[in-house]
Amino acid sequence: MESTEEEHERLAGYPTFVDGIPESDWPRLHLSEGDLQRVRRKKSPHTQLGYAVQIVVPRFLGRAQTDMSRIPKDLVEHVGGQLGMADPLVAIRRYGEHGDTVRAHAREIEREDGWTSFGEGRRRLEQQIEHWLENAPAGPRALRAKMLGWLLEQRIMLPALSTLDALVGKHRTTAEEHVIATLYRKVTPAQIHVIDQLMESLEGRPSQLSSLRGRIDGDSVSSLERALRRAEDIAGLGFADVDVSDIPERWLAFLAGRAMTAKVARVKEHTTKHAAALAAIKRLEKSALNDAIDILDRLITGRFINKPKRWAEKELLRAYPKFAANSALVAEAILAVLKSVAEQVDTETGEISDPHTDTASTRALLETHADRHALAEAAKNLLTHVPARDSDVDEARRTKALEQYPTLRKLVPLLVSRRLFGANPPGRRALTALYDLPRLMEADHVRDGDIDTELLKGSWRRLVLGTPGTEPSSINRQAYAMCVVETFHQRLCARDIYVVGSSRWGNPKAALLPRETWARERLSRLAGLGLPEDADTYLARAREELHAVFDRVDSRVPDGAQVVSPDGRLVLAKAVAPRTSALSRKMDEMLPRAELPEVILYVLNHIGGTAAFTTATGEPFAYTELEASVAAVMVGLGCNVGLAAVASDRGKKALTLEHLERISHGFRPETIEACNKLMVEAGNAIPLTRHNGQQLASVDGIHFTIPAPQPHLRIAPQGSTDISWMTVLTEQAMQLSGRMVSGKPSAALEALGVLAAHRPPRRSGIPYAAIVAEAGTHEDIVFGLLNLCGYAYQPTTNQIADHRLWRMDSTAYPHLRDVTRRIINVDLISEYWDDILHLIASIHHGAVSPDDALRILTHHGKPNRMGAALAAVGRIWKTHHLLNLYDSPEYRRGIETQSRLHQARHKLAKRICHGIDGPYPEYQPGLENNLGPLGLVLNAVTLFNTIWIHKIVEKMRAQGRDIPDSEARQLDLLRFDHINMRGRFHFELRAEGIAIREPDPEPALGEAVADGSDGLGGR
């Protein structure tokens, strides 16, 4: 029968043996070879059994259990079976009689298995709890679950459940009191009096504050009026000027929910009551505005756009049979007339003469198709249903929408009288016109000088200015009012117009650098980015550069060359696999042969890599022969063979299994990144890899589908099944960054985020100025973002979705005329130039991530006006890049080579990660833990190759061989035939050292052999 404590643990979800051990957990409770070695050091059989049981218990419970009577019988028998014991239950009882020994063993196991006692880890846990609660509240169960997960992850022994519960209560109370005190300090005595009145509840009725919570639905003007009145009532309470931006939104929501309950009115502690009420009022201010503008959106969309559109589509469909026949009749008649008046060519003399036509013959020709009256009626019918030449397809819909003018007359005063809206520059004209509408709608006469004609786009110009029957210079005020409201709605959806104080319809640019900071630091930040302050300067420079490329390519296109595909896209050459040069074959012969552990030890020694690995508390490991231990862990995890396969108890304590397991706890994301950074810096310092010009960086992802269920995998959000391991490689094939993300993100934006964070141009002098990656959606915007951030975006031919070219002016290029018919909207760029610069500076500063920037630039998956402006910038540089791809084989070859690095790295990874059930190509449980060490091993092999290839090149040059730098830099740094990845592992360097091998005689180095190899690994 379970005790009260056990029942409490079970109900709380605390690890316990009460419900037995699930089938999936038994593999974790199996003794490894290292465990058995430790157990056999104990003398008596019952001591061995008890010690073995104590080894496996923390793996399930997360804590030691010194009361042997509480160990499940099936676990004792499971462990006893591995030790070959006949009666383990008797032995475990005997072991339990020696309490001092049991507790001493528990302490020994805690120390040797890398566990931290709760007493030592308590302060770190409390700091973590404070961090969690600083950003958001958490209920007792949720916070306890977080604490459990964190303690197990950090290998800190779990305390008694009551201890955790006490910490939960203490820190939740402290965090809540802090937030409450902060909020309370923001209210004045007068505001406290208002709160007391709002919170007063009479005879069990809801308080006035609770009554304000009621949401208003519908899509009518009356619904909007009630919603706006509710927002005004809440704003009129007198708390609009209280700034709560320093309080996390989730804390406000938590306290606001408390304020809406009946209990809070009876709370004697006034500080809590007043703080909760303030949180509720500030939440209501935003939600009331959100609800009101949602109604406005539904009203305009439904009544002024969708309903008329459905009517217009039905009318068009109803009339289609008639005007389709009319269009065929008119087309046949026109073609016949055109044929009759076509010039006639004498086949013998080549003389061209006009045909003989007269009115009678033309009439007779027309009447062979239909009588003139029928043709005239057919033409009139077509004009009724087909938009005029100066109109668009929306004219019928907009004409029908004018029937909703009475609704619009009620709507406009509601919007104008509240003054709820603000506008960014692109929306100011529409907002100004909206605020001016009431005056125009009440005026006796409205002429074209009274309105903003710049808003009249497409069919609106005909409907407003050209309506038949109107007086000269007068306008159709109904059409103009509808045009203004429709334009206002478009700008509102694009957030060029926004609602002040709303969270859903607010200004998306609020996350950018504050305007004051931007105004103060504008020039210095633009100087750092190399961007001019005015758009004209930028566009003039871009136009000059683009014209130069167009002119160069056009002059080099041979007559008759296929430049354009049938769909109007530039025809680009397909990538060709490189050939293996004689110099590359010479490298294969001369590179020193080595075992993988030797390679890793050599690199760790070369870069001082062990300094990157620390304990969980950030302290360096205080062990001798740490390089051997770190190398063994890298091989065991990176090769996916496990630590037992690389452990040894012969001679070196540094290689015992228990020691390696302890060291493996130092392989955390931050330590792996620190070690990678050391390797990247060491690679950049080698002359072989130094570049005088720009250096390429590429990013690619390995995509995995997670089989359900994988509850331990925290990277994938609820319901997601796709994850990607995104790696950013330098031109030296070194991994600059690697991280697991959910879904399939834009590789180019991932690269921009990583490179912006590393800031390599400023720290190491190596300008990662070009990025090779796939853009994903919004390709043109990505081109613009990366270029303005200082990176040339250079995707391969296959990574570009749209191969169309764009011009900035009307300059003609004879050989490219069929692919240069599209003109970039430079006026749009000028209109949004200041906003674009503000966004780019915010990305560079780190205030906005590239992914967040894309959200600012798009709405419902489509570019807004600012996004379209940035896409126009992107088209300049995409055209520049496409022309270079078409014209320059060397340019194309460099990009294709960088892109192939990922393929070659995958081949090397597959060779290294050769353990059974390795992560390639499918997801395996624990994948997310092994890819970090695998990246370290890949970088180590790459750096080892780089060092020795450089030594071989220098030796050959010293012998009189002429090896140009350009040829040396084409050598494959990911080759692996000279490295043995398998067999028994020995973690020590040879006494005689690693040396270059002497090559066999070879033909001249200029020769090359087309052997089908891609020149990048895979031999």
Image (tube, rainbow, N blue to C red):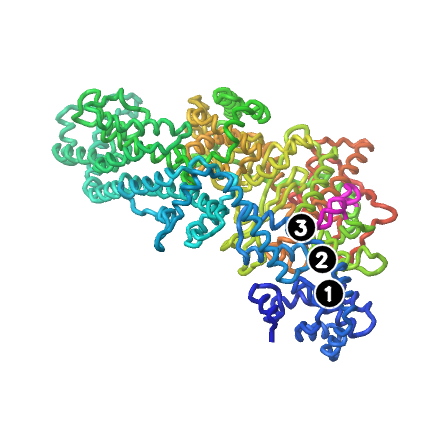
Name the mark nearer the viewer: 1 or 2.
2
Assess whether residue 613 is covered by the magenta stretch: yes
Tell which circle, 3 or 1, labels the residue nearer the N-terminal end.
Answer: 1
The residue indicated by pointer 3 is: 124
- Residues 1015 and 642: in front is 642
The residue indicated by pointer 2 is: 117
x, y percent for residue 887: 55, 30
Disc 3 marks a residue whose amino acid type is: Arg
x, y percent for residue 827: 42, 24
Q: Which residues are magenta?
A: 602-620
Q: Relative to 341, is 789 on the left or the right?
A: right
Q: CA distance from mark 2 to mark 3?
A: 12 Å
Disc 2 marks a residue whose amino acid type is: Ser
Crowd tier of the residue under label 2, counting other residues whose Cα lies within 10 Å: few below 14, some 14–19, many 20 or above: some
x, y percent for residue 231: 35, 40
Instruction: Give SS at disc 1.
Output: loop
Q: Relative to 475, is 153 on the left or the right?
A: right
The residue indicated by pointer 1 is: 32
Where the N terminus falls, by quadrant? bottom right
Assess whether residue 716 is covered by the magenta stretch: no
Crowd tier of the residue under label 3, counting other residues whose Cα lies within 10 Å: few below 14, some 14–19, many 20 or above: few
Tell which circle, 1 or 2, labels the residue nearer the N-terminal end.
Answer: 1
Tell which circle, 2 or 3, labels the residue nearer the N-terminal end.
Answer: 2
Q: CA distance from mark 1 to mark 2?
A: 23 Å
- Residue 14 appears in the figure: yes
